[in-house]
Image (tube, grey):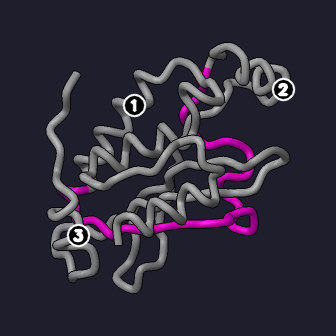
């Protein structure tokens, strides 16, 4: 299903301007993990000073806290989850981030696309359907260029930011 998209110029035009119709953000993030890390987005409402008031996480990962699906997912697709995983909301594990401020229309657009991805991402695979690829689809929807999803999460987010700023 193709979804209408707001262009990166539309997102960038209002990125840091005062917004009358809402103060929102999306943050592309990477965090450390026992393996090579994890890439995900955090989004929600912020105040005029940029402080986060609410936060929700979306990211693609195996649907288990067991290591078995993670290991199997390097060979075959395994069932996925698309919400927060352990460590996503703990800032001390963050290794890279890129925050984009949004107005209400931009936020509603990207939120609808995230919900679409969450409803249509049934599997995780280390190469074919990984967390960075999931995040890259969100960046692409917003009109940004996304790097190769095989980069390790910290490098992925740093490269995503460098490619688009």
Q: Which residue is mark 1?
A: 117
Q: Which residue is mark 2?
A: 66
Q: Quadrant of residue 79?
A: top right
Q: Residue at x 74, y 45 (%)?
A: 86
Lower position in the chain sequence, tag 2 or tag 1? 2
Above or below for 16 versus 130: below
Q: Secondary structure at mark 2?
A: loop
Q: Residue at x 17, y 54 (%)?
A: 7
Q: Real-space Cα distance between discs 3 and 2?
A: 40 Å
| Residue 85 rendering spot, x and y as whole percentages | 67, 42
The quadrant of the rendering that contains the N terminus is top left
| Residue 104 rendering spot, x and y as whole percentages | 22, 60
Q: Real-space Cα distance between discs 3 and 1?
A: 23 Å
Q: Nearer the viewer, residue 159 or 5?
A: 159
| Residue 78 rendering spot, x and y as whole percentages | 66, 16
What is the magenta range? Answer: 80-106
Where residue 146 is drawn, which disc sits there?
none
Cβ–Cβ under 8 Å for marks 3 and 2: no
Q: Secondary structure at mark 1?
A: helix
Q: Secondary structure at mark 3?
A: helix
Using a 10 Å C-alpha cutoff, classify the residue at mark 3 as few (fewer than 14 neighbours), some (14 to 19) or many (20 or more).
some
**Residue 79 among magenta residues:** no
Q: Residue furthest bottom?
A: 49
Using a 10 Å C-alpha cutoff, classify the residue at mark 1 as few (fewer than 14 neighbours), some (14 to 19) or many (20 or more).
some
**Residue 88 among magenta residues:** yes
Q: Residue at x 60, y 48 (%)?
A: 151
Q: Nearer the viewer, residue 147 or 5?
A: 147
Q: Which residue is mark 3?
A: 12
């Amino acid at each position: 299903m193709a979804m209408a998209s707001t262009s990166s110029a539309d997102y960038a035009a209002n990125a840091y301007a005062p917004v009358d119709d809402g103060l929102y953000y999306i943050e592309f993030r990477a965090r450390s993990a026992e393996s090579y890390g994890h890439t995900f987005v955090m989004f929600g409402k912020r105040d005029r000073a940029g402080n986060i008031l609410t936060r929700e996480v979306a990211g693609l990962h195996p649907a288990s806290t067991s290591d078995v699906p993670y290991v199997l997912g390097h060979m075959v697709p395994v069932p996925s989850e698309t919400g927060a995983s352990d460590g996503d909301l703990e800032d001390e594990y963050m290794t890279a981030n890129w925050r984009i401020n949004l107005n209400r229309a931009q936020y509603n657009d990207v939120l609808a696309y995230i919900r679409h991805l969450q409803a249509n991402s049934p599997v995780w695979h280390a190469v074919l359907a990984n967390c960075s690829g999931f995040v890259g689809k969100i960046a692409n929807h917003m009109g940004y260029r996304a790097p190769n999803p095989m980069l390790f999460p910290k490098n992925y987010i740093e490269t995503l930011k460098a490619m688009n700023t």
